[in-house]
Image (cartoon, rainbow, N blue to C red):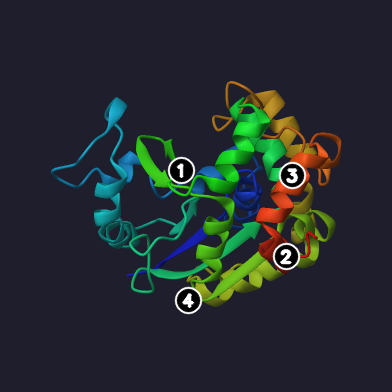
Amino acid sequence: MHKNIFLASYPKSGNTWLRSIIGNFYNFDKEFSLNDVKSIPLLSIKKHFSEFDKKVYINNNDLHFDWISQNIIKCQNILNNTPNHLNIFKTHSARHKNFTNETVNAGFICIVRDPRDIIVSLKNFSGKEIDKTIDEFLFSKSLMITTNGAQELLSTWELNVQSWLNYKSVPRLIIRYEDLKLNPKEIILKIKEFLNKIHSLNIKLSDQEIDKIIENTNFNNLKKLEDKNGFDEASKHSKFFRSGTSNQWKDVLTNTQINLIEKNLKSLMRYFNYI
């Protein structure tokens, strides 16, 4: 059995950018497109539980979070034994005790982003008022999201990020969105080296090929590809690749909103050098 690998993040932190980079690692012999991200699917989707009986649903025929929690380790066992699969999965879930463990998981990459910028991106993507977005982001410990027919526990940004920082029984790589943006080659080489240590599919790419991956997956090119062909992860409120800039919060958030975020997230923001 090949154990799986997670790309973990809070939404709008760069997970899809990371998927495009890693998808391009394994599909470098083909012309790059946004379809490369589909080689790294979300774990918590209905079709991954197709072999299970006695499913429990909530509204709109979505799989219930409690039922998923009881079966998600077994689901990973099944997926890990599926041939011709990268065994790399995206997740926005907080790592609650039933989500995954070292019996099925080989390691993870967690990408984090300045929470003030996440607020701006979430607000535009969801169409919610910014104060509502901030309130959920800071205080909604039981916040759920539903994607492709299955519930996932998002929780607050602090609890979500901390849950992955506390997961120390497998190899891990923690990266900042801002570092990937400023020093893409350095961070992409770290990602490649990390995956080569824990993944059975050895990535062999030259310096020039890494440069090409950086060109393929820079934000402007991703935005152009979405403008040309669309992207099924966009929302009705916003294109998926909208801005991608850092420090956009300085032009959007009020001093009251900034102070509220920084006061409640002081410890983790200091840990990641955001304040």
Tell me if 202 is positioned left or right of 63 in this view: right
Real-space CA distance between mark 1 and mark 4, rounded to the nearest whole angstrom = 26 Å
110, 49: nearer the viewer? 110
The residue identified by callout 1 is: 143
What is the residue that sits farthest to the top in this orientation?
236
201, 135: nearer the viewer? 135
Q: Circles 3 and 2: CB distance less than 8 Å?
A: no
Q: Position of residue 220 (x, y in %)?
A: 79, 38
The structure residue drawn at horizontal position 77% and vertical position 40%, both measured from the top left corner, is 256
Q: Is residue 49 above or below residue 236?
A: below
The residue identified by callout 3 is: 117
Dot 2 or dot 4, earlier in sequence: 4
Real-space CA distance between mark 3 and mark 1, rounded to the nearest whole angstrom = 20 Å
Asked where in the image residue 125 lies, by quadrant, the reply is top right
Dot 3 or dot 1, earlier in sequence: 3
Dot 1 or dot 4, earlier in sequence: 1
Dot 3 or dot 2, earlier in sequence: 3
Residue 272 circle label:
2
Q: Is residue 206 visible?
A: no
Q: Circles 1 and 4: CB distance less than 8 Å?
A: no
| Amino acid bearing label 3 | Asp
Q: Is residue 208 above or below residue 52?
A: below
| Amino acid bearing label 4 | Val
Q: Circles 3 and 1: CB distance less than 8 Å?
A: no
Q: Is residue 29 above or below residue 203?
A: above
Real-space CA distance between mark 2 and mark 4, rounded to the nearest whole angstrom = 21 Å
Q: Is residue 229 above or below residue 175?
A: above
Real-space CA distance between mark 4 and mark 3, rounded to the nearest whole angstrom = 29 Å
**Which quadrant is the N terminus positioned in?**
bottom left
170, 214: nearer the viewer? 170
| Amino acid bearing label 1 | Leu
